[in-house]
Image (cartoon, rainbow, N blue to C red):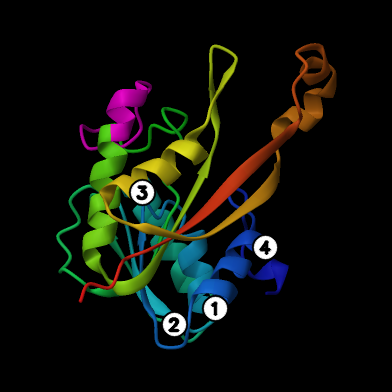
Amino acid sequence: MHRNMMKTNYSRTKLGELDRVVKTYMRKGDRFIELCCGWSTFGSVAKYYGYSGVGCDIWDVAIEHSTRQIAAMPGDGKVKIEHGDAMDTKYKDNEFDFLYCNPPFLDQEMYGGTENDIADKNVGKFREKIEKMLGECLRIIKPGALAVITINDGRKAGNIVPLGSYMLSWGLEVGFVIHDIAIGEIRSLALKMRKDAYARRRTVKCHEYILTFRKPVTK
């Protein structure tokens, strides 16, 4: 993909990672759904490669930005941006061929500011919301379809909260099987504060977990 085709100032995930996701996991004719679409960086990449689908979010600011970004993105795909709750999507069972979601990381992003915002500082409550979301992911994709969930680890009181491990476990609990795992390296803002990271004996790198689940085919 030509790097000048999309500004990624507000995207948490590198274009290269999404480029790899689309090329590795999607196939011609797949109709996708992007939950918690945010700035629709994934949807924009998918459109560029000719895929059509839907992006949804609860945050009006994201919906407005995504609508403009998708309209400006070249490509033959047709992508519709809608207001939608990832924990209660209203889409039909077995409707989509592929799903992508980059949900909030605990309370790091309080996007909607509403009761149905997935973000939560309480890990237990966050788990309940994520499991509702994952249940919807499982319901709305076709048997055998792939669902890619991207998540980073977080920190509480200086300690790692292993959201990557949690997400893998929660996905299996709702009924997915794990199809593939990839880990990307994110150059975090801590690079600008290397001395502080060194003093705390921490790495300046942040890892992004790309968990690809598959919906089982029932006989």
Q: Residue at x 28, y 26 (%)?
A: 125
Q: Position of residue 49 (x, y in %)?
A: 54, 81
Residue type, mark 3 in image: Gly
Q: Which residue bears the numbered disc 4?
A: 16
Q: Earlier in the sequence, mark 2 or mark 1?
A: 1
Which residue position holds label 1? 48
Residue mark closest to the camera, 2 vs 3: 3
Q: Residue at x 38, y 59 (%)?
A: 177
The span from disc 2 to disc 1 (Cα, nearest Å) is 7 Å
Hey, what amino acid is under mark 2? Answer: Gly
Mark 2 near mark 4, Cβ–Cβ under 8 Å? no
Question: Quick one: label 2 or label 3, which is nearer the N terminus?
Answer: 2
Please state if 175 lies on the left or on the right of 194 as rendered: left
Q: What is the x, y in percent for residue 108?
A: 47, 29
**Please, what is the three-letter code of the amino acid marked with disc 4?**
Gly
Residue 13 marker: none
Q: Are marks 2 and 3 in contact (CB under 8 Å)?
A: no
Q: Determine whether label 2 and label 1 are within 8 Å by CB.
A: yes
C-alpha gap between disc 1 and disc 4:
13 Å
Image coords of residue 69 (percent x, y): 48, 64
Q: Nearer the viewer, residue 91 or 143?
A: 143
